[in-house]
Image (cartoon, grey):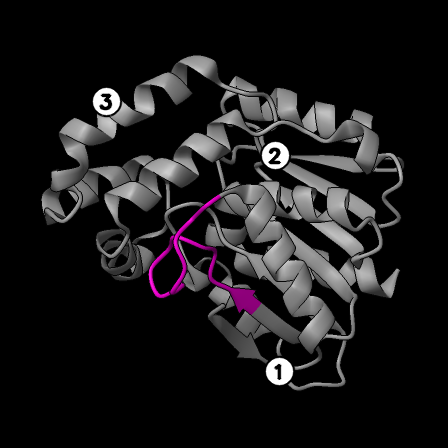
């Protein structure tokens, strides 16, 4: 598993998982901010540019990251966070190992299966995948994601490197993912759930479902923000939130 690392060992450890179709640069700015007093590790999810592994399932990827934490980080971290597909992976990790972290940050996670969207993924990518490497098309996609401009080259480079098979696989897994509610009842982490005020209804409903399923989970609705904007476009505020969890 490929990772990017910031800070030094011996400091409080933060592991952050990027969104689907993105990569480590999703949390790069936050990691640079946190590096003075934290060790920050940014894994590349399976099936994404440079991961070296095809995507199989959210469950498999979660197990792989748990194994990494066991092998390299002593079996537990201070903060484990993720955006979208990364947030689903964090929830799956908490289902598999409820004590894997002290604090979990769940940003813009969908946990209510989207049957129609899921059914359309194969046909949609079958006809449009070839456009991904066209800059004009990438620009349109990038604009729709509301990501700040200085991340476009990272986005374009890494989206071009994702295979059609992997893109289809992780998108289908993401749109069919649902909470493992029974397993999450034994979660020992403090779970902090974030959703933008302007998220699609599925994500807003999912945030409520997560809070209802995980004991003690807290929900913050971010005024005026769209999907994933907190960590991508407001990285300093995101980093400050993570710091506050560990200092409280």
- Which residue bears the numbered disc 2? 195
Assess disc 3: are there few (<14), some (14-19) or many (≥20) residues with their C-alpha within 10 Å of its C-alpha: few
In which image quadrant can residue 30 be found?
bottom right
Q: Nearer the viewer, residue 80 or 193?
A: 80
Assess disc 1: are there few (<14), some (14-19) or many (≥20) residues with their C-alpha within 10 Å of its C-alpha: some
Q: Is residue 114 above or below residue 188?
A: above
Q: Which callout, 1 or 2, points to the residue nearer the camera?
A: 1
Q: Residue at x 12, y 40 (%)?
A: 130
- Which residue bears the numbered disc 1? 7
**On the picture, is 64 further left or further right than 105?**
left
Compare marks 3 and 2 and give the one earlier in the sequence: 3
Assess disc 2: are there few (<14), some (14-19) or many (≥20) residues with their C-alpha within 10 Å of its C-alpha: many
Total residue callouts:
3
Q: CA distance from mark 1 to mark 2?
A: 28 Å
- Which residue bears the numbered disc 3? 123
| Residue 109 in picture, x, y percent from top left | 58, 35
Asked if residue 101 is among those painted magenta in the image, a careful observer would answer no
Q: Residue at x 49, y 22 (%)?
A: 200
Compare marks 1 and 3 and give the one earlier in the sequence: 1
Q: CA distance from mark 1 to mark 3?
A: 44 Å
In which image quadrant can residue 74 be found?
bottom right
Compare marks 1 and 2 and give the one earlier in the sequence: 1
Question: Badges 1 and 3: C-beta atoms under 8 Å apart?
Answer: no
**On the picture, is 241 further left or further right than 4?**
right
Q: CA distance from mark 3 to mark 2?
A: 29 Å
Quarter of the image that includes the C terminus: bottom right
**On the picture, is 139 further left or further right than 24?**
left
Q: Residue at x 17, y 43 (%)?
A: 132
Q: Which callout, 1 or 3, points to the residue nearer the camera?
A: 3
> Where are the magenta residues, as a range?
42-56
Q: Residue at x 50, y 71 (%)?
A: 3
């Amino acid at each position: 598993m490929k990772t990017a690392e910031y800070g030094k060992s011996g400091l409080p450890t933060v592991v952050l998982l990027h969104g689907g179709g993105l990569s480590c640069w999703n949390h790069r700015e936050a990691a640079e901010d946190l590096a003075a007093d934290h060790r920050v590790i940014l894994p590349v999810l399976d099936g994404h540019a440079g991961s070296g592994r095809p995507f199989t399932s959210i469950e498999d990827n979660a197990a792989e990251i748990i194994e990494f934490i066991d092998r390299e980080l002593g079996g537990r971290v201070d903060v484990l966070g993720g955006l979208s597909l990364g947030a689903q992976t964090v929830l799956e990790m908490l289902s598999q190992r409820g004590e894997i972290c002290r604090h979990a940050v769940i940003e813009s996670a969908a946990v209510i299966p989207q049957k129609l969207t899921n059914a359309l993924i194969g046909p949609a990518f079958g006809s449009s995948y070839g456009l991904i490497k066209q800059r004009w098309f990438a620009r349109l996609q990038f604009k729709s994601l509301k990501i700040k401009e200085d991340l476009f080259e990272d986005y374009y480079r890494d989206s071009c490197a994702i295979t059609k098979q992997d893109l289809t696989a992780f998108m289908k897994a993401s749109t069919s993912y649902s909470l493992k509610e029974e397993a999450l009842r034994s979660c020992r982490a403090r779970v902090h759930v974030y959703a933008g005020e302007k998220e699609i209804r599925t994500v807003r409903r999912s945030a409520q479902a997560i809070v209802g399923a995980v004991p003690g989970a807290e929900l913050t609705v971010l005024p005026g923000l769209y999907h994933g904007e907190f960590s991508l476009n407001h990285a300093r505020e995101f980093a400050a939130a993570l710091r506050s969890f560990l200092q409280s």
